[in-house]
Image (cartoon, coloured by chain):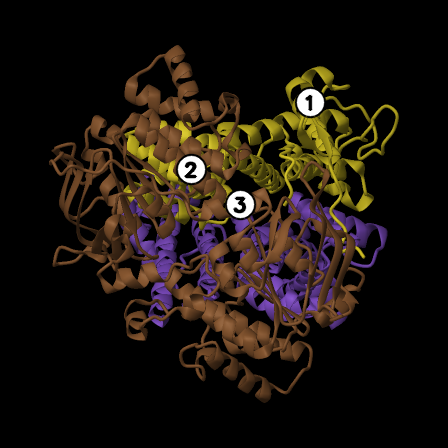
Chain colours: A yellow, B purple, C brown
C-alpha cells in the first residue's frame, strides 16, 4: 500500500535543524580550542619534567595517558601539543582563506586578463603535490613557526581561490548582479554587498575543510621531522619521537594520532551537519 | 565535433606543459635557496678560499640564476641528472633502482585498491541509505580524515604487534619465496590501499548517486526497468567519466602517501631517498627526485582532466 | 455498464517537509477514465496534477508517498502492488511521456535503443520487430527521416522532435493508458501544433486512453474529452470539455477562464499630434562573439532593428525563442552594448553601453527580468533590496527611505509587513511584484519588461498585468513588453513588433492585430491555441510556410 519510506526526521531548535552529531562535533572542537588557549594552566605536570622512571609507561592513575620515550607525562605533552597544532593550523587557514576568497571574488567580478593570469598561476601552483612543496620549502628555509604558517597558507590558497571564484562566478551570472551593474554600482559594492553574503556559507564550509587539510599536512611534515622542531612538539612530532614504542603498543605513540583524528573528524562532521534554517516546505 | 574535442584536449596538454615549466622553476628556485655555501660545505675541511672559488667556478655557481636554471633543465631533458653531493655518484644511477621499487609499490596498490574501491563505491550507491552504505561511508570518511601515519601505525599495531601475521619492516633482501615477498609488501600496500580507496569510494559513490538522480534514470524506472538495469545500463555508463576521473585524482594522492609510507616502513623507494637527501642537503638529488614526483603528479591530474573532457557525450 | 479502464477512489498522497512535518499534498481525489477517453488534469503549479498522474504508475517522487486510497488500472490496484509487480505494468499497460523530453533521454545512448528499450525490459518482441515498429511510429508521428532519425543521439535532435520521439517511446509497448506530462510546455507555439496533431492522430488510431496534464486550457481543449480542474490537491470541478469552456460552475474554474482571456484596456485614441517619443531606436545591431571584418558580431542576434515608444504608451515585442527579442532588450538597456545604430531617449542621444550613460539616463530606463529568483538577492531582505535604489539614485536618508518603501509596497499591492522577509519566503507572484517595485523606486519613465510573466502561473500573471496597467495610469509610465505569449502582449500593448531571426518583421497596431500582413506574423498568430475544441482539427497551415519559418 505504501511506497518507499521517508527519511528520518531531525530535531528542531529555534527554527533551525540541529542534529546530535553536529552538537557533539562542535563540543569537541570547542574543547580543543579551550585546551589550546589555556594549556599552560591545565597541564598536570610541566612539559619537560621526567616523571616516570619507566619509559613508554602504560595508562595509570597518575599518568592518564602513560609516559613517553623519556618518561615524560603524555597527557601534558598532548595538551601542550594542541597549542601548536591548532594554533599554527588556524593561523595558516585564516591567511589562506582570506587571500583566496578575496582574490577569487575580485577575479570573478573583474574578469579579463587579471583573472586569466591569476588563475593560470595558481593552477600551476596547485600542480605541485602538497607534501613535496612543504618538504622542499622547509628544507630550504627551515621550519620556524612563521615559515610553517606561510608555507601551509601558500599551499592551500589556490584551492580556496578556485572554490571562491567558482562560487562568485556563479553568482555573477545572476540577474540581480546585472541590475546592480546597470544601476552603476562600483566593483567594491558589488563584491561586498551583493556577492559575499551569498557565498559566505559555502566558504565557511570550505574553511573547515581546508583546516583539516592543513592539520593533516602539518602533522605529516612534523612526522617526517620537517615540521616543528624540538623542544616544541605538535601532535605529529609527538608521534615521530615516540615511534619506538610501536612494537610495545605503548599509548605514547597512539594517543597523539587519536588527538589529531578527533579534531579532524569533528570538523568534517560539523561541516556535514551544520544547522539549517527550517523552511517547512516539501521537496 | 571531433575538432572541438581535440582543441580542448590540446589546450589542456599545453597548460600541463606550462605548469611543468613553472613547477620546475619553483623547485630549482627553492632548492637553490638552501642555506650555506654549497661549495664550502662540499669541500668541508679542505675549504681554502682558492679551492672554494675554483669549485664554484667548476660548478657554475657564480652564473646568474636564470642561466643555471636553463642549464639544469636542459641537462634533465638529456638525462643528465647531475652528481649527488653526498654519495659522489651520478644521480641517475642512485635513483634508477629506487624509482622502480616505488613504481612497483604504486602498481600493486593500484591493482588492489581500484577494484576494491569500485566494488564498494558502486554497491554503496546502489544500496543508498542501508546500514551497509552507512558503514562504508563512516569508515571511508574516517580514513580520509586521519593522517596516513595513523593508518600505518594502526596497521602495524594490528597486523604486526597483535596478530603477528606480518613483519613491520620491509627488506626485500630477506625474501626467499613469493610468499615472503608478499608479506613484506603487505603492510605498505595495506596502508596505501586504505588511504587511496577511501578517496575513490567517496567520489565513486557520489558520482553514481548524482547520475541516479537524473531524469533519464527516473524515465527508465517509469518504463518498468529493474533497479539493476537502471544502474548498469543507464547510470553507470554516464557515471563512468566522473568515476575514472575520480580514480586518476585519487591515484595522485599516492605521491604524498608514498612519502609517509616509505619512511615509516623503511621501504627502499625514491620517496625515502628524497627525504634522506633533504637531511643531507643533497641538492641535485633533491631536485631530480622532486621533478620526478611533480611529473608523475601532473601526469595523473592532466589525465583526469582529459578524461573528464572526453567523457562529455555532447562532444561526440 | 461499461467497465472503466481506470478507477481512482479517495487517493491521498503525503509529503514530508524539511521540518519533519507531514502534509497531505493530494487530498481525497476520485475519478474514472473510460477506455479510449482522454481526461485532462489542469491547474496551476503546486496543484498536484503531476503527482496524481504519477500515481497511476504507482510512483511517487522523492519525499512523497501514497498514503491512502485505491488506484485501479485495468483491474489492478497500483497502490497495493509490490514494486516489482508495478514494474511489470509500467511501459506495457501504462506509459509516460515526460515534460522535458531532453532530460528524459540518456545522452550517451542512441535514440532508437531507448525507444525500443521497453520491448527489451518486458520481452514483448524481438529486436528487429521492435525497430520496425519504432520506425512505423516515427512515421505516424510525422517525424522527418523516420528510418534514420533513431540512429542519432538526443542532443543532435530538436526539442519538438524529441518530444515526439518520447511519445514513440511510450507507445511502443502498446499501452492502454498514456500519461502526457505537460509535453508541449517548453515548445514554441508553431512547434506545439505539429506535436499536438501528431499526438491526436496516434491516440485516435490506437483508441488509447490518456491523462493530459497541463496548465494551458487552450491546449487541453484541443485534445481532452473531459477536464478536471485541480487546486491545492483537490478536484474543484470535473466535466466535459465543452461544459467547462462554455459554462463553468466552480468559481476557481471561472477565475482560470478569465485569466485566459485577459481584458484589453480601453485606450484614449491618439488624435494624431506628434508627441516626442520617449525612446527611439535606429538600425540597432547587436550580437555575441568577436567582431568580424565586416563590422558585425560573430553571432548577430539583432539585425538593424528600428522602433519607437511614445510617452505613456506601450510597445510589445513578440517572437519565438531565438528571434533576438531578449538580446534587443539588453541592447536597449545597454547591458549588451549594440555595435552600431543610435538610441534616442527623452529627446537626447544615449550611449549604447550602460557604462557610458549618465546616472539619470540609467535611472529613467529600468529593466525587469523574467526569473524573480535570480533577480532578487537572496541574502537581502525586501526592505534592503528596495532601499538601495532609493539611497543610490535619490540620496534619501533613513526615515525617508522607510516611508518610501511602504509606499512602494502599497503601489504593487503587497502587505507592508513583507519588508522584513527574504525573497525565499515569497511566492513567485510576490517576488515579481517586488522586482517591479524596485524598478519603480528609481522613478523611471520607461520600464523594459523581459518576459516577466512567462515563469508565472496564468492567474498570477493576469494579476501582474492588471497591476502594470494601473501603475501606468497612475504614474504615466511607458512599457516595452517582451514576450512569446501573444495573449499577454495583446492585453497590455498598443503596438506590437513581431520579430524573427533578429529582424523586425512587422509592426502591428491594435486595429490590425486581427489581420497581420507578413506571412510569419500570420503563421505565429494563427498558431496560438484558442479555447475552441475544434480549433486544432480545423487548422490549416501552409506547409511551405512552416518549413520556411519552423524549427522542426
Mark 3 surroundings: few (<14), some (14-19) or many (≥20) residues within 10 A: some
Mark pair 3, 2: CA separation: 18 Å
Query: Label 1: chain?
Result: A
Image point 78% across, 29% down: which residue? A71
Using residue C58 as the reference point, say whether residue C305 is left or right of it: left
Is B121 drawn above or below residue C343 in the view shown? below
Tell me, yes or no, whether dots 1 and 2 are on the same chain. no
User: Are the residues flagged by discs 1 and 3 in contact, CB closer than 8 Å?
Assistant: no
Q: Nearer the viewer, mark 1 or mark 3?
A: 3
Mark pair 1, 2: CA separation: 60 Å
Mark sitting on residue A35: 1
Instruction: Kindly give the residue lying farthest to the right in the view shown.
Output: A61
Mark sitting on residue A25: none
Q: Nearer the viewer, mark 1 or mark 2?
A: 2
Mark sitting on residue C254: 3
Circle 2 residue: C464
Image point 63% across, 25% down: which residue? A83
Q: Is residue C402 at all visible to an observer of this figure? A: yes
Amino acid at each position: 500500500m505504501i511506497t518507499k519510506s521517508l527519511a528520518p526526521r531531525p530535531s528542531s531548535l529555534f527554527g533551525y535543524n540541529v542534529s546530535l552529531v553536529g552538537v557533539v562535533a562542535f563540543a569537541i572542537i570547542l574543547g580543543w580550542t579551550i585546551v589550546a588557549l589555556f594549556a599552560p594552566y591545565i597541564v598536570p605536570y610541566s612539559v619537560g619534567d621526567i616523571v616516570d622512571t619507566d619509559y613508554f609507561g602504560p595508562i595509570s592513575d597518575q599518568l592518564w595517558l602513560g609516559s613517553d620515550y623519556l618518561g615524560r607525562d603524555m597527557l601534558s605533552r598532548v595538551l601542550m601539543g594542541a597549542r601548536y597544532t591548532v594554533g599554527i593550523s588556524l593561523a595558516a587557514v585564516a591567511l589562506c582563506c582570506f587571500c583566496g576568497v578575496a582574490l577569487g571574488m575580485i577575479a570573478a567580478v573583474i574578469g579579463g586578463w587579471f583573472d586569466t593570469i591569476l588563475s593560470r598561476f595558481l593552477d600551476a601552483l596547485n600542480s605541485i603535490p602538497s607534501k613535496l612543496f612543504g618538504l622542499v620549502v622547509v628544507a630550504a628555509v627551515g621550519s620556524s613557526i612563521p615559515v610553517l604558517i606561510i608555507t601551509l597558507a601558500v599551499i592551500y590558497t589556490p584551492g580556496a581561490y578556485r572554490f571562491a571564484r567558482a562560487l562568485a562566478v556563479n553568482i555573477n551570472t545572476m540577474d540581480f548582479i546585472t541590475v546592480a551593474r546597470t544601476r552603476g554600482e562600483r566593483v567594491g559594492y558589488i563584491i561586498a554587498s551583493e556577492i559575499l553574503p551569498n557565498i559566505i556559507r559555502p566558504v565557511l564550509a570550505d574553511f573547515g575543510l581546508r583546516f583539516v587539510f592543513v592539520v593533516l599536512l602539518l602533522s605529516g611534515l612534523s612526522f617526517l621531522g620537517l615540521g616543528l622542531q624540538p623542544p616544541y612538539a605538535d601532535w605529529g612530532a609527538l608521534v615521530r619521537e615516540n615511534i619506538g614504542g610501536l612494537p610495545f603498543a605503548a599509548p605514547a605513540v597512539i594517543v597523539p594520532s587519536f588527538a589529531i583524528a578527533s579534531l579532524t573528524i569533528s570538523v568534517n562532521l560539523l561541516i556535514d551537519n551544520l544547522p539549517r534554517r527550517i523552511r517547512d516546505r516539501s521537496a | 565535433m571531433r575538432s572541438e574535442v581535440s582543441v580542448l584536449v590540446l589546450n589542456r596538454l599545453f597548460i600541463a606543459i606550462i605548469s611543468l615549466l613553472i613547477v620546475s622553476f619553483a623547485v630549482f628556485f627553492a632548492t637553490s635557496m638552501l642555506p650555506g655555501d654549497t661549495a664550502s660545505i662540499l669541500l668541508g675541511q679542505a675549504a681554502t678560499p682558492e679551492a672554494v672559488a675554483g669549485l664554484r667556478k667548476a660548478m657554475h655557481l657564480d652564473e646568474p640564476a636564470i642561466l643555471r636554471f636553463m642549464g639544469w633543465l636542459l641537462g634533465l631533458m638529456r638525462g643528465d641528472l647531475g652528481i649527488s653531493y653526498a654519495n659522489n655518484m651520478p644521480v641517475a644511477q642512485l635513483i634508477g633502482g629506487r624509482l622502480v621499487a616505488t613504481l612497483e609499490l604504486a602498481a600493486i596498490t593500484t591493482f588492489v585498491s581500484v577494484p576494491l574501491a569500485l566494488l564498494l563505491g558502486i554497491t554503496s550507491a546502489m544500496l543508498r541509505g542501508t546500514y551497509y552504505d552507512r558503514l562504508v561511508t563512516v569508515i571511508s570518511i574516517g580514513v580520509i580524515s586521519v593522517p596516513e601515519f595513523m593508518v600505518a601505525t594502526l596497521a602495524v599495531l594490528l597486523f604486526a604487534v597483535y596478530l603477528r601475521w606480518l613483519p613491520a619492516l620491509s627488506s626485500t633482501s630477506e625474501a626467499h619465496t613469493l610468499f615472503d615477498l608478499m608479506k613484506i609488501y603487505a603492510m605498505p600496500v595495506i596502508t596505501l590501499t586504505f588511504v587511496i580507496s577511501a578517496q575513490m569510494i567517496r567520489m565513486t559513490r557520489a558520482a553514481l548517486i548524482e547520475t541516479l538522480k537524473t531524469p533519464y534514470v527516473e524515465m527508465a524506472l517509469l518504463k518498468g526497468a529493474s533497479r539493476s538495469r537502471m544502474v548498469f545500463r543507464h547510470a553507470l555508463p554516464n557515471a563512468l567519466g566522473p568515476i575514472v576521473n575520480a580514480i586518476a585524482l585519487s591515484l595522485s594522492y599516492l605521491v604524498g602517501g608514498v612519502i609517509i609510507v616509505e619512511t615509516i616502513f623503511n621501504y627502499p623507494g625514491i620517496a625515502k631517498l628524497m627525504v634522506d637527501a633533504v637531511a643531507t642537503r643533497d641538492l641535485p638529488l633533491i631536485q631530480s627526485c622532486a621533478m620526478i614526483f611533480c611529473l608523475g603528479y601532473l601526469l595523473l591530474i592532466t589525465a583526469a582532466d582529459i578524461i573528464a573532457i572526453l567523457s562529455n557525450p555532447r562532444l561526440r | 455498464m461499461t467497465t472503466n479502464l481506470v478507477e481512482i477512489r479517495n487517493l491521498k498522497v503525503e509529503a514530508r517537509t524539511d521540518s519533519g512535518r507531514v502534509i497531505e499534498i493530494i487530498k481525497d481525489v476520485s475519478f474514472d477514465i473510460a477506455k479510449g477517453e482522454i481526461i485532462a488534469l489542469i491547474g496551476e503549479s503546486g496543484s498536484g496534477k503531476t503527482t496524481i498522474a504519477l500515481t497511476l504508475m504507482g510512483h511517487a517522487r522523492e519525499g512523497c508517498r501514497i498514503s491512502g486510497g485505491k488506484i485501479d488500472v485495468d483491474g489492478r490496484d497500483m497502490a497495493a502492488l509490490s514494486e516489482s509487480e508495478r514494474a511489470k505494468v509500467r511501459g506495457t499497460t501504462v506509459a509516460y511521456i515526460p515534460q522535458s523530453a531532453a532530460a528524459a533521454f540518456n545522452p550517451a545512448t542512441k535514440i532508437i535503443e531507448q525507444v525500443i528499450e521497453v520491448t527489451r525490459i518486458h520481452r514483448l518482441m524481438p529486436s528487429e520487430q521492435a525497430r520496425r515498429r519504432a520506425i512505423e511510429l516515427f512515421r505516424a508521428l510525422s517525424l522527418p527521416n523516420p528510418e534514420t532519425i533513431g540512429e542519432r543521439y538526443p542532443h543532435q535532435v530538436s526539442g519538438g522532435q524529441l518530444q515526439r520521439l518520447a511519445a514513440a517511446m511510450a507507445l511502443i509497448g502498446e499501452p492502454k493508458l498514456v500519461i502526457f506530462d505537460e509535453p508541449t510546455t517548453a515548445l514554441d507555439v508553431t512547434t506545439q501544433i505539429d506535436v499536438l496533431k501528431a499526438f491526436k492522430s496516434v491516440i485516435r488510431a490506437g483508441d488509447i486512453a490518456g491523462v493530459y496534464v497541463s496548465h494551458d486550457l487552450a491546449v487541453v481543449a484541443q485534445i481532452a474529452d473531459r477536464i478536471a480542474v485541480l487546486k491545492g490537491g483537490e478536484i474543484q470541478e470535473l466535466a466535459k470539455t465543452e461544459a467547462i469552456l462554455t459554462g463553468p460552475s466552480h468559481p476557481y474554474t471561472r477565475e482560470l477562464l478569465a485569466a485566459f482571456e485577459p481584458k484589453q484596456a480601453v485606450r484614449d485614441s491618439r488624435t494624431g499630434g506628434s508627441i516626442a517619443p520617449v525612446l527611439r531606436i535606429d538600425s540597432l545591431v547587436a550580437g555575441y562573439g568577436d567582431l568580424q571584418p565586416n563590422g558585425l558580431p560573430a553571432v548577430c542576434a539583432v539585425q538593424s532593428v528600428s522602433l519607437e515608444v511614445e510617452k505613456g504608451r506601450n510597445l510589445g515585442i513578440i517572437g519565438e525563442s531565438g528571434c533576438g527579442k531578449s538580446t534587443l532588450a539588453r541592447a536597449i538597456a545597454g547591458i549588451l552594448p549594440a555595435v552600431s545604430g543610435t538610441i534616442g531617449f527623452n529627446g537626447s542621444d544615449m550611449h549604447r553601453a550602460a557604462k557610458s550613460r549618465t546616472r539619470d539616463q540609467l535611472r529613467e530606463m529600468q529593466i525587469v527580468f523574467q526569473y524573480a529568483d535570480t533577480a532578487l538577492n537572496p541574502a537581502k531582505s525586501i526592505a534592503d533590496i528596495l532601499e538601495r535604489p532609493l539611497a543610490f539614485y535619490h540620496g534619501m536618508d533613513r526615515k525617508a527611505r522607510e516611508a518610501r518603501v511602504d509606499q512602494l509596497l502599497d503601489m504593487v499591492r503587497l502587505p507592508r509587513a513583507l519588508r522584513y522577509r527574504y525573497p525565499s519566503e515569497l511566492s513567485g507572484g510576490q517576488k515579481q511584484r517586488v522586482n517591479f517595485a524596485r524598478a519603480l523606486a528609481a522613478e523611471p519613465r520607461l520600464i523594459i519588461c523581459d518576459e516577466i510573466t512567462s515563469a508565472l502561473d496564468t492567474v498570477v500573471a493576469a494579476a501582474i498585468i492588471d497591476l502594470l496597467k494601473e501603475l501606468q495610469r497612475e504614474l504615466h509610465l511607458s512599457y516595452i513588453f517582451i514576450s512569446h505569449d501573444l495573449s499577454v502582449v495583446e492585453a497590455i500593448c498598443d503596438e506590437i513588433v513581431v520579430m524573427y531571426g533578429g529582424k523586425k518583421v512587422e509592426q502591428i497596431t491594435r486595429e490590425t492585430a486581427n489581420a497581420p500582413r507578413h506571412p510569419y506574423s500570420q503563421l505565429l498568430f494563427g498558431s496560438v491555441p484558442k479555447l475552441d475544441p475544434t480549433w486544432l482539427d480545423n487548422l490549416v497551415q501552409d506547409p511551405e510556410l512552416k518549413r520556411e519559418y519552423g524549427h522542426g
